[in-house]
């Protein structure tokens, strides 16, 4: 797992630049670049700073790898795994009732597609 790639993905997803993270964490932009490109492995303390700057829980940096591994046993294609990972990422901050609503909508879409 390349933590830098994961950090970059979340940063871009949130429409933030490395400069935005620099301002929120005090970490130098050049350091963030080295982390994102896999040249430097940050400490847990530094990862926590970056997670806070991205409004994430530290565990979210590692959840995608676990989910991807679990989904790979389902014989899904790369596009399907990417889609489901994105749904998981976006739904992580939803309330329980919103998650149920989202799941009901997905089921409805699946039923109309299969019909």
Image (cartoon, rainbow, N blue to C red):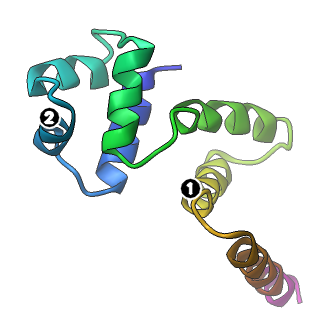
Instruction: Confirm whether the magenta stretch covers residue 43.
Output: no
Residue extent of the magenta highlight:
110-115
Residue in the foreground of this view, choosing between 8 and 82: 8
Residue lying at 33% horizontally and 37% vertically, measured from the top left: 8
Image mark count: 2
For marks 2 and 1 on the same chain, the one whose residue lies earlier in the sequence: 2
Give the secondary structure at mark 2.
helix
Residue 107 in the image, given as x and y percentages of width and height: 83, 79
Residue 47 in the image, given as x and y percentages of width and height: 39, 24
Instruction: Name the residue carrying label 1.
Output: 86
Residue in the foreground of this view, choosing between 65 and 79: 65
Q: Is residue 33 above or below residue 59?
A: above
Asked if marks 2 and 1 touch (Cβ < 8 Å), the reply is: no
Instruction: Name the residue carrying label 2.
Output: 22
Few, some or many residues within 10 Å of mark 2 (<14, 14–19, 20+): some
Quarter of the N terminus within the rendering: top right
Residue 26 in the image, given as x and y percentages of width and height: 14, 28
Q: Foreground mark, 2 or 1?
A: 2
Q: Is residue 78 above or below residue 70?
A: below
Residue lying at 86% horizontally and 85% vertically, measured from the top left: 111
Residue lying at 74% horizontally and 84% vertically, measured from the top left: 105
Residue in the foreground of this view, choosing between 37 and 21: 21
């Amino acid at each position: 797992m390349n933590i830098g790639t994961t950090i970059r993905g979340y940063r871009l997803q949130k429409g933030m630049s490395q400069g935005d993270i620099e301002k929120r964490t005090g970490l130098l932009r050049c350091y963030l670049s080295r982390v994102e490109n896999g040249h430097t492995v940050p400490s847990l303390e530094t990862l926590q700073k970056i997670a806070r700057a991205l409004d994430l829980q530290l565990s979210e940096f590692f959840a995608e790898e676990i989910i991807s591994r679990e989904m790979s046993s389902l014989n899904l294609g790369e596009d399907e795994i990417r889609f489901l990972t994105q749904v998981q990422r976006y739904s992580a901050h939803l309330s329980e009732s919103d998650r149920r609503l989202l799941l009901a909508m997905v089921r409805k879409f699946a039923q109309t597609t299969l019909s």
